[in-house]
Image: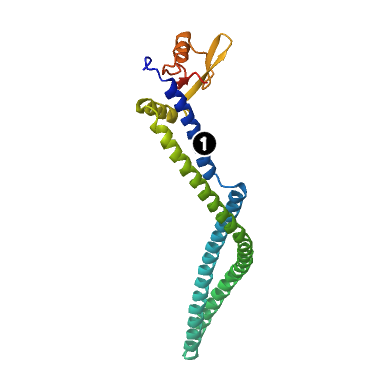
Amino acid sequence: MGSVNGAEALKALYALQEKDLEIDRLRAEAESPPEELVALQGQVEALEERLTNLLERRAELEREYNRHSLDIEDLSAKEKQAEEEQKRAQSAREQTQYENRIQQIKDRIRELLELSTPIMEAMENLEAEIAQVEEELAALRPRLQELLEANRARVAELEAAIAAKVEERTTMAAAIPAQILKEYEAIRRARRGTGVARMAAQGQVYRCEGCNVVLPTHVAQKVVRGQVVRCPSCGRLLWKGE
């Protein structure tokens, strides 16, 4: 590779990298929604999660309340039946047994009613809280929809710009030798976006602008001659610049 004179190829490669970095920037911009949208989405999601939890809690309370109501209904029927049977009792002993049975049923009904009261109060409080959260969501959702539509338009515009840049990039890449292009793309993936770096002169020494390491003299000489070489430190292709 060191014997290949690739000065023009490296120049074209550096220009291609500028195009790649521009495409990267546009893609990052497309993937980064506006701060107001992110904040509002977070607010709405938090409220929706809160509403879900409230609705689940309400459903639990309703099940518990309904269970008590069914028990009370069943006990009331048993109380009525016991009272009817008491009327047909033939002895004082039977009368006493039915009285005790009826009193036990009444006591249990009273206990269930006492248990049901706080459940009803909790349900009323939940209804008020649910209504408040739903009101807050109703106030936020129109603005969220506006921001989402604006972001979709923004992303569509950026994607159109990216497509145009990619087309330009394809044309530029076609003029670069396939082997050096393949090497550049592999290095760029490994080095987070940059596969070629300029060599900068600083007094009597030369540095790689990619990693700022001083280059060995024999490497710098090859770069000056336009040969295709890589930085011994970071591995990027080196270009002498204009």
Percent coordinates x, y for residue 239 in the rendering: 48, 20
Q: Is residue 148 visible?
A: yes
Q: Which residue is mark 1?
A: 22
Q: Name the residue at 48% across, 8% down.
A: 217
Residue drawn at the location 50% of the way across and 90% of the way down: 87
Q: Estimate the x, y position of residue 216 in percent, counting from the top left.
A: 48, 10
Q: Is residue 89 left or right of residue 115?
A: left
Q: How is the image coloured?
A: rainbow
* Residue type indicated by callout 1: Glu
Q: Give the image location of residue 22, x and y in percent.
A: 52, 36
Q: Position of residue 120 (x, y in %)?
A: 60, 70
Helix, strand or loop under label 1: helix
Residue 122 vs 97, above or below: the answer is above
Q: Nearer the viewer, residue 169 or 105?
A: 169
Q: Is residue 192 shown to the viewer in this render?
A: no
Residue 167 lies, with reference to residue 229, above or below; the image says below
Q: Residues within 10 Å of mark 1 (few under 14, many from 20)?
A: some
Q: In the displayed structure, does residue 144 sit left or right of residue 20?
A: right
Residue 232 quadrant: top left
Q: Kindly identify the residue that appears in the image at 46 percent across and 15 percent down.
A: 223
